Structures are given as C-alpha cells and as structure tokens.
C-alpha cells in the first residue's frame, strides 16, 4: 500500500482517485470545490485542508488540473514541502513549456516527476482503462508504474520530461482533423443521396478506415455505440478538443512548424462552440457542418 496525495478531483480526477482507493492505497485528497471534497470523504479518502497538507508524507503525488498556470502554481506550493524521492505525476493536459518547467522545479527539489496526460475520457477514468502518455526518467516511470496500472489500461513511456504532453497534443490534433474529415464525408454522403449505412460500410472497410469512423462514428445508429447515439452528450467535450488544439498550435508556433490543417481545425471548433456546440461531444461538429453553406465552413 502506498501513501498517495491526489490533487484535483474533477470529472477525470475523482474516478481516478477512487480507483486508487479501491485498490487499497491510502489516498489523501484535495480540491478547491467543497462538493468534491465531500465525495472524496464518502469514498473513503482522507480529505486535506490544502494541497500542501495533502502531500505531507506522500510517496506518490498525482495532480489533475485545468491548465499550465494552475499546475505551476500548485507545484510552487507543494514541491518545497514534498518528501525527497517522492514521485510526482501530473496527469493534466497542458502546454509543453509548462510541463518542462514543472519537471525542472520538481527535479531541483529531489523529486521524481512525470508528465502523464491521459486519453480515454471519463468512461476510461471510471473503468481504469485510460491510456497514459508519459514523459520523465526511467526511474520515475518504474516507480510510478504500479499506481498508473490501476488507473490505466496502457502506459506509453514517450521519453524525457515534456514528451508525454507532446504526444498528447500531436495525437489530439490529428484526432480533430480526422473527426472533421469523417463528419464532412457523412454530411456530403447525405446531401448527395448516399445512406449513412452504405457510407459506413464502405469507409470502415476501405482506405477511409480510421478511429473516428470505425470506433466513434459521428452518425447515430451506425457502428459501435458512440456519443452520437446519446444526443452528442460528451465523451470528449468539444471545449476540451478546442483547448488541445490551442496547445498544439502554441507548440507549432514555438517550434516554427506549419500545421495548416491543425490551425483550420481549431478555427472550425471555435466556430462550432460559438454556434451551439458548447456542452456537446467533439463529434457533434457534424451538426454544424451539415447546417453550413459551402462558403461558411471554408
């Protein structure tokens, strides 16, 4: 049994922390939202009055926070008081520069940091089947693996500090582009008289084969069950996709790399959110595309 501090009990963090508690670990939890702290206590976790109190004597520290500035602020509070040799795992999705800064801060204090953003959504967090994209030293990865295995179904050690975030934003940029392409194809099929069933049967078994069609089809009643079958209630919210696209474009600008499709995808998701997409799954962008004139979405 490990002594684990868990900071950030939102839609993803709470089920992740619950899984650690169910596995028999001692979890001391903190969140700024009172209701989250009440839930944590009801689930058998030890509530902490602050992030600093949560990390007291912790062997493993896990953070799941909204953005880079908040991650760095929390690290500034907890790193100086954390036990030397503790593993600190940031599961937030943040910009690469902030991730590297957090690594440097933790390493200077004698901690073992990992950036470990996740894929799999809230369903994966509840089921303990998340994919972790991990950056950090071999030693930190080795020590964190037993804990990460409880929360995830797949661990990918991508390299040194910051590489987990790099992998996450590259993957999600491609996912956004792929989903927009899938939505455009099904929208066009409908307009020119091809049934969604026929389009799926062809695309899913030929050169258009992709995760956005075969596993997460944006058309209801086609393929495996997806948010399209539930009124586009989020599995992965459009707001989060827009955030990740922003991180990808920030990284592209910093690196001097052209990503024209990624930049266009970001603009499309921005418009989708402004025109009713807030609170919907990212695959719900098909509704915006189907209702747009040719000139509006170009």
Image: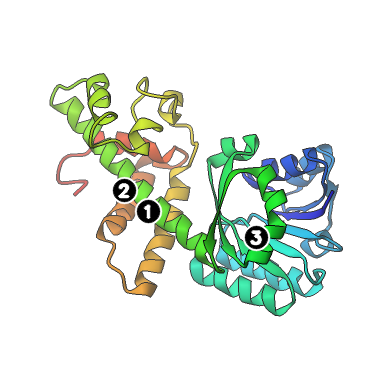
Of residues 192 and 272, the one nearer the viewer is 192
Q: Is residue 127 above or below residue 201?
A: below
Local packing at callout 3 (Cα closer than 10 Å; few below 14, some 14-19, many 20+) is many
Q: Is residue 53 above or below residue 256?
A: above
Residue appearing at x 22%, y 46% in the figure: 297
Residue linked to disc 2? 177
Q: Earlier in the sequence, mark 3 or mark 1?
A: 3
Residue linked to disc 1? 173
Q: Is residue 221 left or right of residue 292?
A: right
Q: Is residue 272 above or below residue 108?
A: above
Local packing at callout 2 (Cα closer than 10 Å; few below 14, some 14-19, many 20+) is some
Residue 291 visible in the shown view? no
Local packing at callout 1 (Cα closer than 10 Å; few below 14, some 14-19, many 20+) is many
Residue appearing at x 68%, y 40% in the figure: 15
- Secondary structure of the residue carrying tag 3 is helix
Q: Which mark is residue 141?
A: 3
Q: Is residue 163 left or right of residue 263?
A: right
Considering every residue shown, the one lying at the far bottom of the view is 108
Residue 20 horizontal/vertical position (percent): 75, 44
- Secondary structure of the residue carrying tag 1 is helix
- In the rendered image, which quarter is residue 43 located in? top right
Of residues 2 and 28, the one nearer the viewer is 2
Task: Give the image's coloring scheme.
Answer: rainbow
Residue 251 horizontal/vertical position (percent): 41, 68
Disc 2 to disc 1: CB gap under 8 Å:
yes
Residue 223 visible in the shown view? yes
Q: Earlier in the sequence, mark 3 or mark 2?
A: 3
């Amino acid at each position: 049994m490990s002594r684990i501090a868990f900071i950030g009990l939102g839609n993803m963090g709470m089920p992740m922390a619950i899984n650690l508690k169910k596995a028999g670990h001692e979890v001391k939890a903190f969140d700024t939202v009172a209701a989250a702290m009440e839930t944590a206590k009801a689930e058998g976790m030890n509530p902490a009055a602050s992030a600093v109190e949560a990390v007291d004597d912790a062997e493993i520290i896990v953070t799941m926070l909204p953005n880079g500035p908040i991650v760095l602020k929390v690290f500034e509070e907890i790193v100086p008081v954390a036990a030397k040799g503790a593993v600190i795992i940031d599961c937030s999705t943040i910009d690469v520069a902030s991730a590297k800064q957090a690594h440097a801060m933790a390493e200077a204090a004698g901690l073992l940091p990992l950036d470990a953003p996740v894929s799999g959504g809230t369903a994966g967090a509840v089921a303990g089947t998340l994919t972790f994209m991990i950056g950090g030293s071999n030693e930190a990865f080795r020590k964190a693996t037993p804990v990460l295995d409880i929360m995830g179904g797949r661990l990918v050690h991508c390299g040194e500090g910051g590489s987990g975030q790099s992998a996450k934003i590259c993957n999600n940029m491609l996912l956004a582009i792929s989903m927009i392409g899938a939505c455009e194809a099904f929208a066009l099929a409908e307009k020119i008289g091809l049934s969604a069933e026929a389009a799926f049967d062809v695309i899913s078994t030929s050169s258009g084969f992709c995760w956005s069609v075969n596993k997460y089809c944006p058309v209801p009643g086609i393929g495996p069950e997806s948010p399209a079958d539930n009124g586009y209630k989020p599995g992965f919210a459009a707001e989060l996709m827009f955030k990740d696209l922003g991180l990808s474009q920030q990284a592209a600008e910093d690196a001097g790399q052209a990503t024209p499709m990624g930049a266009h995808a970001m603009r499309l998701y921005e418009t989708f959110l402004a025109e009713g997409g807030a609170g919907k799954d990212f695959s719900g962008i098909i509704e915006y595309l189907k209702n747009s004139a040719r000139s509006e979405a170009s």
